[in-house]
């Protein structure tokens, strides 16, 4: 039974001896409305019970407080995720910078050793020149290997743009 059905309902006129509509037709329409209303009330009660059972299950499983739909992040959750992402990016940036600093220091140390060996070689021109040349060649190979490794690392892990002041503020629309 729909509201439109009720609006379009017609009743036959009562016999000539009485005024109004046929009493039997009106009573039959009222019985149908009552049975439809009972069915709708029962369905509504069943749906309310199901909804309460689902809310209780959600609370029991610590999914939420049951008042908001699950799967929809709160503003606090979005901001916390943005802060965590920003902290992770800063940590990765700092680690890459530290790796670059270590490679530069290793290169400088290798060059200093080579320079020292070269100076010692020129001073001791009469010493074991073959051994010194072999050691210098070995150190140059190490320096070259460090350089290649650093270049490979730099090509696989390009440096992200440095954080700007506007990028450090979390925006709920940017997440």
Image (tube, grey):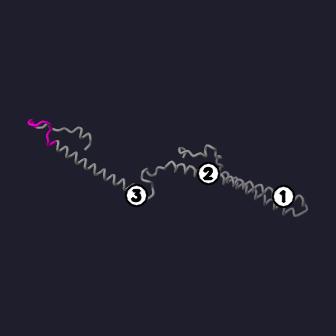
Magenta region includes residue 16: yes
Who comes first in sequence, dot 1 or dot 3? 3
Question: Which residue is disc 1 drawn over?
Answer: 116
152 sits left or right of 61 in the view? right
95 sits left or right of 112 in the view? left
Q: How would you classify the magenta stretch by its main secondary structure?
A: loop
Q: Secondary structure at mark 2?
A: helix
Question: How far is the residue under mark 1 from the one under mark 2?
Answer: 41 Å
Question: Which residue is disc 2 drawn over?
Answer: 89
Q: Nearer the viewer, residue 95 or 21?
A: 21
Residue at 42 percent of width and 53 percent of height = 66
Residue 16 locus on image (x, y percent): 9, 35
Residue 72 locus on image (x, y percent): 47, 49
Query: Disc count in the image?
Result: 3
For label 2, count other residues whose C-alpha is less than 10 Å away and answer few (under 14), some (14-19) or many (20+): some
37 sits left or right of 150 in the view? left
Question: Which residue is disc 3 drawn over?
Answer: 57
In this view, the mark in front (3 or 2): 3
Q: Residue furthest right?
A: 126
**From what the image shows, is residue 6 above or below residue 79?**
above
Q: Nearer the viewer, residue 135 or 60?
A: 60
- Magenta residues span 15-25
């Amino acid at each position: 039974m729909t509201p439109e059905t009720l609006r379009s309902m017609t009743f036959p006129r009562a016999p000539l001896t009485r005024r109004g509509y046929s009493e039997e037709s009106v009573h039959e329409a009222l019985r149908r409305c009552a049975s439809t209303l009972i069915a709708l009330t029962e369905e509504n009660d069943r749906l309310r019970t199901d909804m309460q059972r689902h809310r209780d299950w959600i609370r029991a499983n610590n999914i939420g407080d049951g008042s908001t739909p699950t799967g929809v992040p709160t503003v606090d959750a979005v901001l916390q995720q943005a802060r965590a992402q920003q902290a992770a990016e800063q940590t990765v940036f700092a680690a890459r910078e530290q790796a670059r600093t270590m490679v530069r220091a290793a290169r400088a140390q290798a060059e200093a050793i080579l320079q020292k060996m070269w100076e010692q070689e020129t001073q001791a021109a009469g010493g074991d020149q073959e051994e010194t040349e072999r050691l210098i060649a070995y150190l140059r190979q190490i320096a070259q290997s460090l350089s290649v490794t650093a270049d490979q690392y730099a090509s696989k892990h390009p440096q992200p743009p440095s954080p700007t002041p506007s990028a450090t503020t979390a925006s709920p629309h940017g997440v």
